[in-house]
Amino acid sequence: MLPLWYRNAVVYAVDPAMFRDSDGDGWGDLRGLTNRLEHLRGLGATCVWLLPFYPSPFKDGGYDITDHLSVDPRLGTIPDVVALLEQAEEAGIRVLFDLVVQHTSDKHPWFQAARSDPESPYRDYYLWSDEPVEDGLEPVFPTVEDGVWTWDEEAGQYYRHMFYAHEPDLNLANPQVRAEIRRIMAFWLRLGVSGFRVDAVPYMVSAAEEVEEYKSGTDLLRELREFVALRHPEAVLIGEVDVPAEEYDDYFLEGDGLTMLLNFWLNNHMFLALARGEAAPVHEALGRLPVPPRRSQFANWLRNHDELDLERLSAAEREEVMAVFAPDEDMRAYGRGIRRRVAPMLGGDHRRIAAAHALLLSLPGTPVLQYGDEIGMGDDLGRRERLSVRIPMQWTADEHGGFSSAPAEHLVATPVADGPFGYREINVYDQQRRPGSLLAKIGDMVRTRLGLTEIGFGTHRVLDTGSPSVVSLIHEDERDGRVVTLVNLSGDDVEVRLRDEELDDLVDVLTDREYPPEEDDGPVLRLAGHGYRWLRPRSHVFK
Ligand code: BGC
């Protein structure tokens, strides 16, 4: 097993409740995902990240967990997890689970025991106060929750919750709680996962500031990484770390902390660049990022299962992106983000969506694709908050988009049937058979990217091309491999001049269309509106 596999991986994020219902109860399930691993493999994904499938009241899409060591009966059983892991291994796909241990559901037996008995050993699993606390902490969902401390009648105390009031925060300073986390990780690692996406990391770290033996709260990450690495050297921790870019190093800890950081900084600047049709926000954002230590990496994505949280932009930049991509109030969430998927934001234009993915896949770091974005699925603004983007996968033009055979009233969510993003227009089956489909294009990109190991393993530089709309990067590795990636964010055709003399004999390895050889004698390359070209030195391709 190569411990650095994640540097050249393509991750596919799946909400198992929304992917495919195998037993007709209306909920997507683990068997449904297992049966559809061929779709991931066809796309070229090398890793799947499963959103929570644990028992849950599903008041927060499954992030409100009542038992971290089993499976919600609507989604499957532990043997189904084993079958999924075996099939994924057979298909060469690694599996990551979501580790949500910053809080639990208020229905978790720990919280039930804690609130009903002050003497219970579980009382100290959570954070309590006799008085309302003035700690200046703001709730993560400010338009939904008034504060982070809520009175619990049964406990006779206030408890803290950074997220929803039904998600009490765990007291990570309690060694018993940290022991529980180790039990959870050991359990799933034994079953065969390749690591975890760790939820809400900065809040975990700040709670761990209270641990006496720690020099800093980030020692928690050191502890978790060591625990994981001792069991599986190749296992990774991908952290949800939405903090200023200058703080990323505190989470990498010179290679002893998180293996990968979800790069919110770059994500936000990608959308600023897309909104403006200009490369500068991406070029400049890259320049502000620390170089990850050798045993670490960034993870990049366009859209995930949450709102597009634009907090890494200035207020003016945020407004700019909102004005372009979320003109209606209803498209926005929590006063800071956009609750739409990428396809509707880009007007359903498959050329633009493909270019956005070409941008994602040409950035240094590990790309994470959101299920359904590979076919350009839309969203359902009729669903509340972020649920708008968590909708059933569209497999075919049949009833319920081939997601489930259950009667409509049993469905976990109503599939999008009508309009330009409905399953009659947008589905996997149709696009699989069409050579120029979005699915075909993104699949080509993913598979090509896997061969361009310089992007995952090497270093990168921004190339000065004199074309303001083109994100232009060169990726180089120590074996002298080179890849140039050009992505045009504007709708206009452009010419790109590569000033670096060494770059005058490049050949295309991936393009949005055919580009006949130039007649010009200098290194000038044409790019169509929303076009992209990835190139390598001729000597590398024809050696
Ligand atoms: C998840 C959200 C969830 C929140 C609380 C975030 O990291 O991505 O979907 O609501 O944590 O668990």
Image: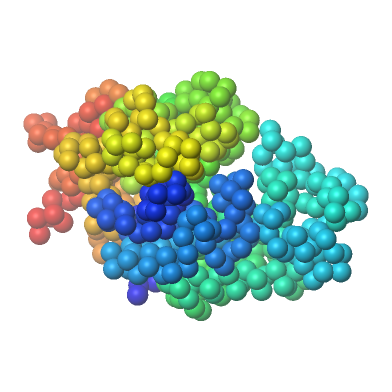
Q: Quick check: 458 left or right of 14?
A: left
Q: Position of residue 185 (x, y in %)?
A: 55, 70
The C terminus - image quarter: bottom left
Colour scheme shown: rainbow
* Residue 236: image location, x then y, percent: 47, 66
Residue 349 at what x, y percent from top left? 31, 27
In-front residue for pair 128/265: 128
Q: Residue at x 48, y 72 (%)?
A: 189
Query: Looking at the image, which residue sits at the far right?
Result: 131
Q: Is residue 285 left or right of residue 204?
A: left
- Left or right of 332? Residue 512 is left
* Residue 490 at least partly seen: no
Q: Nearer the viewer, residue 415 or 341?
A: 415
Q: Is residue 402 visible?
A: yes
The x, y position of residue 263, in whole percent, is 50, 49
In the image, residue 409 sits, relative to residue 199, either above or below, namely above
